[in-house]
């Protein structure tokens, strides 16, 4: 009797494992996300979250959340100024730097009080930004991977 129960349990476990493998084969998790008119490849371990109250898409790995925003023009300066001028109301200061990644001009703002980092760049004649609300050690690498993965 015990052997029959053991065989039945083993059969159930094999069927569950088989079902899991088949399900994942036909319904894989998305590894990219469309924001505006650009596809971004998600970093390993990240998946699409919900859209926040201002319309920005979030991606998360369960521990960290990043937001990707799309603006309907190509004026980076306007959005950097709007962001840093808002700091006058909160008494935050920011360090601003500019650089290029794969020939794409990037502007970065870092909250000097140890909080958020914010990146802006132009792709397909539109401004995109990637930002977080907490200090995340890997944000630069993840951002660089996101911008390099974006298609035209």
Image (cartoon, helix red, strand yellow):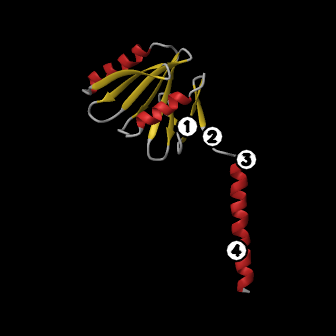
Compute the Cα span from label 1 to label 2: 8 Å
Assign the N terminus to one quadrant of the image: bottom right
What number is the disc on residue 26? 3
Compared across the picture, whether 26 is left or right of 49 comes to: right
Q: Is residue 103 above or below residue 136?
A: above
> What is the x, y in percent for residue 120?
44, 22
Front residue of 46 and 146: 146
What number is the disc on residue 9? 4
Identify the residue shown where x is 32% and y is 35%. 115
> What is the x, y in percent for residue 112?
27, 30
Compute the Cα span from label 2 to label 3: 12 Å
Identify the residue shown where x is 45% and y is 40%. 65
Residues at discs 2 and 3 in contact (Cβ within 8 Å): no
- Label located before the other in sequence (1 or 2): 2
Q: Secondary structure at mark 3?
A: helix
Identify the residue shown where x is 52% and y is 17%. 126
Residues packed near mark 2 inside 10 Å, few (<14), some (14 to 19) or many (20 plus)? few
Residues at discs 1 and 2 in contact (Cβ within 8 Å): yes
Compute the Cα span from label 1 to label 3: 19 Å
What number is the disc on residue 109? none
Compute the Cα span from label 1 to label 4: 38 Å
What number is the disc on residue 30? 2
- Label located before the other in sequence (4 or 2): 4
Query: Hey, which quadrant is residue 7 in on the image?
Result: bottom right
């Amino acid at each position: 009797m015990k052997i029959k129960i053991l065989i039945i349990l083993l059969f159930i476990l094999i069927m569950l494992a088989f079902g899991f493998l088949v399900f994942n084969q036909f319904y894989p998790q998305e590894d990219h996300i469309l924001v505006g008119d650009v596809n971004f490849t998600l970093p390993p371990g990240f998946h699409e979250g919900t859209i926040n109250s201002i319309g920005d898409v979030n991606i998360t790995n369960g521990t960290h959340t990043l937001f990707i925003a799309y603006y309907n023009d190509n004026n980076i300066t306007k959005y950097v100024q709007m962001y840093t001028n808002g700091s006058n109301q909160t008494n935050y200061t920011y360090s601003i730097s500019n650089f290029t990644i794969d020939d794409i001009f990037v502007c970065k703002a870092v909250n000097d009080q140890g909080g958020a980092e914010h990146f802006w760049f132009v792709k397909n004649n539109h401004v995109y930004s990637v930002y977080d609300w907490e200090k995340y050690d890997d944000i630069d690498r993840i951002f660089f991977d996101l911008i390099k993965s974006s298609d035209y």
